[in-house]
Image (cartoon, grey):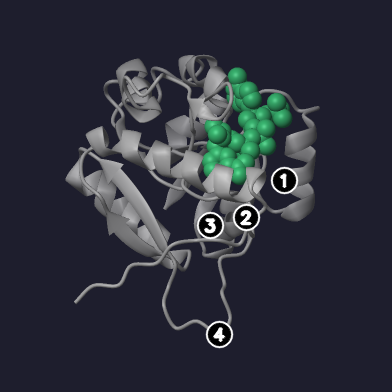
Amino acid sequence: MKIAFLGHGNVGAPLADHLQRLGHEVTLGASDPGSESLRKALVRNATLKTASPPDAVKEADVVFLAVPFPAVPSALGAVASEIRGKVLVDCTNPVGPGLTHGLNSVESGSENVQRLVPEAKVVKAFTIYGFENFEDNSFPGHDIRPMMMFAGDDAAAKRAVAGLISALGWEPVDVGGLVQALHLEHMTLLWVRMVRVLGGSPRTVWARLTR
Ligand SMILES: NC(=O)c1ccc[n+]([C@@H]2O[C@H](COP(=O)([O-])OP(=O)(O)OC[C@H]3O[C@@H](n4cnc5c(N)ncnc54)[C@H](OP(=O)(O)O)[C@@H]3O)[C@@H](O)[C@H]2O)c1
């Protein structure tokens, strides 16, 4: 699969690295060749390709959006015409002052993203944990796979993202339509408070038990 990344920092770089090692053709959309995050991503994996964001997106089947939430309009604006019809994996989280929801819980960041690029197929995923777990999601001694929840409105796009989630070692858990993204964003705030504020282990993830 051809995969483009918009944002190659804490979240984007390890995901790009792992997906490329799984055999996908991964391209980092890089508008600034002097970017420190680009340098670090290429130190991690020197075989990652780079291209201008529009060129990276034009060639891709799936695009990962992993920029700070305030940068979303400019990152998507730069690729608006190329992103039509593509699967857009929204890894962003809107975070407000004091670890509140950045859009006051009125709508999710992902619905906001979908409005910015109505012809893309937005799937929210890779948001509910800190980046440490995207670097390494192995939990030796446990038989249960950690889960990765995802939400979106397009069934085929969700199947594609579920495949990537599974290949990366997570149990993909479809939580429903994009309307559910707001709840995932609150789960993120829960995780951030538990770990970054209250001192829990950053290697805290959730798993699903059903019967
Ligand atoms: N950190 C976490 O643990 C975590 C976990 C889950 C989800 N998230 C979410 O994932 C997103 C990325 O977080 P992060 O920690 O990876 O951030 P980060 O380390 O600061 O990386 C941000 C990346 O976005 C790029 N970028 C910034 N502005 C851009 C623009 N206007 N157009 C294109 N690219 C732009 C940066 O490039 P330059 O370096 O060149 O500026 C950098 O590659 C955020 O929305 C965050 O809420 C974070």
In this rendering, which labeled residue sits more in front, label 1 or label 4? 4
Residue 165 drawn above or below residue 101: below
Considering the numbered disc 2 on the image, is that residue within a helix, a strand or a loop?
helix
Q: Are marks 2 and 1 in contact (CB under 8 Å)?
A: yes
Ligand 1 quarter of the rendering: top right
Classify 10 Å Cα crowding around label 3: few (below 14), some (14-19), many (20 and above).
some
Asked whether mark 4 lies closer than 8 Å to ligand 1, one says no
Considering the numbered disc 3 on the image, is that residue within a helix, a strand or a loop?
helix
Would you name the residue on which mark 3 appears? 19
Would you name the residue on which mark 1 appears? 41
Classify 10 Å Cα crowding around label 1: few (below 14), some (14-19), many (20 and above).
many
Q: Is residue 51 visible?
A: no
**Mark 3 or mark 1, earlier in chain:** 3
Would you name the residue on which mark 2 appears? 17
Task: Give me the C-alpha separation between circle 1 and circle 4.
Answer: 30 Å
Task: Give me the C-alpha separation between circle 4 and circle 3.
Answer: 24 Å
Q: Amino acid at mark 4?
A: Gly
In this rendering, which labeled residue sits more in front, label 4 or label 3? 4
Q: Are marks 3 and 2 in contact (CB under 8 Å)?
A: yes
- The image position of residue 71, as x and y in percent, is 56, 19
Q: Amino acid at mark 2?
A: Asp
